[in-house]
Amino acid sequence: MPVWVWILLAVAAIAVVVAIVTLSGSNKRKTERLKEHYGPEYERTVSRAGDEKAAAKELAERERQRAKLDIRPLSPAALDGYANRWRAVQIAFVDHPASAVGEADVLVTEVMRERGYPVDDFERQSADISVDHPKVVENYRAAHDIHLAQQHGDVGTEQQRQAFVHYRALFEKLLEAETNTQEASA
């Protein structure tokens, strides 16, 4: 076999090795970015999906779906109105925790709807929120589960308190994101 064929084969083999190393490094960086951004939500998704590759695909799809949404800022009047309504719900929690948890769920849903998040399907809603607020989405799921359990039976005051705290964490993030958007554009 001529020398030039051996050289050509060696160059092709080197190109294949470089491509594999580059792809492997790219996948590793992507995984690290997902882990850093999503935190516990990444681990939850890996557990549900079965492996990291499937989880990465699911999270990438969530990001694509979220990018299609028209998430819009709240007006200053709406922002103040929601903050005032939250304070009223928080005060009502002392005397009527069950109804306050339900009102907190409704209020969070209203803010999400007005901002442009789809709110018809809870799983889609939590997936969309996980892209923007991955650190509190698990709290949101827990609060929603307690709210649903409360509708079907007796839930203790401590669980209601936990649900309310979880709703507040997302509510504050939704308003905080709004505040940061307004500050960035000012």
Image (cartoon, rainbow, N blue to C red):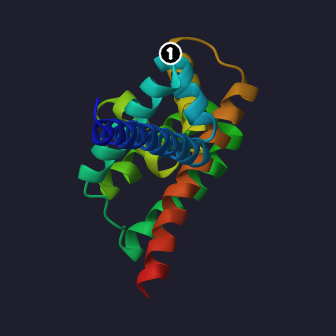
Q: Secondary structure at mark 1?
A: loop
User: Which of the pair 45/51 is nearer the observer?
Assistant: 51
Residue 3: x %, y % from top left: 33, 39
Q: Which quadrant would the N terminus be assigned to in this image?
A: top left
**Residue occupied by mark 1:** 50
Residue 116: x %, y % from top left: 29, 53
Along the horizontal axis of the image, is 161 left or right of 149? Answer: right
Residue at the image position 57 percent from the left and 26 percent from the top: 44
Q: List the single residue furthest toward the bottom.
A: 186
Q: List the single residue furthest toward the top.
A: 153
Residue type of the residue flagged with mark 1: Gly
User: Which of the pair 102/60 is nearer the observer?
Assistant: 60
Along the horizontal axis of the image, is 71 left or right of 151? Answer: left
Residue at the image position 44 percent from the left and 88 percent from the top: 186
User: Which of the pair 76/48 is nearer the observer?
Assistant: 48
Residue at the image position 39 percent from the left and 38 percent from the top: 10
Q: List the single residue furthest toward the front.
A: 2
Mark 1 crowd level (few <14, some 14–19, many ≥20, 10 Å Cα) = few
Residue 117 visible from this viewpoint: no
Q: Quadrant of residue 121?
A: top left
